[in-house]
Amino acid sequence: MKKVVLVFGLISGIISSTLMTIGMLAYSSKEGCSDYGMVIGFASMLLAFSLIFVAVRTFRDKHNNGIVSFGKAFLIGLYISLITSTMYVCSWAVLYKTTMPDFMDKYVATAIEKSKSSGKEEKAIAHEIAELEEAKINYHNPVYFAAYTYMEILPVGILVSLISAAILKRKARNSESAPV
């Protein structure tokens, strides 16, 4: 199980980190690219996490005699999700610090502009702006930075792990209960 988790986790991490880097560099070089950024980001995460399905199936069929419990399949997916998410967080930290240190300023400015043009009540807009400004301040703290970044990707991995485990679980056939 360890080898399957490590191999597929590293491949998935490379995919997610590479696609995130390409996407963020494209975002920073073009105005208006952020409208599709979230869709492209989650699609690239799903692509990377699709390897969870392949890993669980590989473990079940090639290493465990065609049998895997829901719990074991979920654990495989969870471990891969943790490896992938950690690589993603580290890649974003390097990219953010070296290439995009003004990312949060631009992100918050864009979000405030969208909020003001949304037609919401002034009180709701003021509340949103306060939350955005607090998030921008928190983003400078490494703990918050890591937590925010993990919360982007890890839930997607957990969801894919649950779905893969549910689809791929297979119990051993009990030969004792077969009619004689």
Image (cartoon, rainbow, N blue to C red):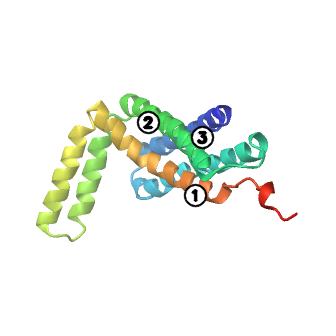
The picture quadrant where one finds residue 94 is top left
Inter-mark Cα distance, 3 to 1: 17 Å
Tell me where residue 96 appears, x and y as whole percent: 38, 34
Seen at 50% across and 50% down, the residue is 158
Q: Amino acid at mark 3?
A: Ser
Q: Along the line of sight, which residue is nearer the eye, 15 or 74?
A: 74
Q: Nearer the viewer, mark 3 or mark 1?
A: 1
Disc 3 vs disc 2: Cβ atoms closer than 8 Å? no
In the displayed structure, would residue 123 be above or below residue 96? Answer: below
Up-down relation of residue 88 to residue 66 (above or below): above
Q: Residues within 10 Å of mark 2 (few under 14, many from 20)?
A: many
Residue 102 placement (x, y as % from top left) = 30, 37
Is mark 2 in CB contact (under 8 Å) with mark 1?
no
- Residue at the spot 44% in from the left edge and 53% down from the top edge: 37
Q: Estimate how packed mark 1 is, as few (under 14), some (14 to 19) or many (20 or more) residues with alpha carbons within 10 Å.
A: some
Question: Which quadrant, please, contains the N terminus?
Answer: top right
Circle 3 SS class:
helix
Q: How much space separates mark 2 and mark 1, taking CA atoms?
A: 23 Å
* Nearer-N-terminus badge (3/1): 3
State the image coordinates of residue 103 (x, y, percent, origin top left). Answer: 33, 41
Q: Earlier in the sequence, mark 3 or mark 2?
A: 3
Q: Amino acid at mark 2?
A: Val
The residue under label 2 is 89
Dot label at residue 163: 1
Quadrant where the C terminus sits is bottom right
**Figure quadrant of residue 32:** bottom left
Query: Which residue occupies the foreground of this view, 111 or 164?
Result: 164
The reply to whether dot 3 and dot 1 touch (C-beta < 8 Å) is no
Name the residue rendered at 29%, 37% in the picture.
144
What is the distance, in whole Å, between disc 3 and disc 2 at their CAs? 13 Å
Q: Which mark is residue 12?
A: 3
Q: Earlier in the sequence, mark 2 or mark 1?
A: 2
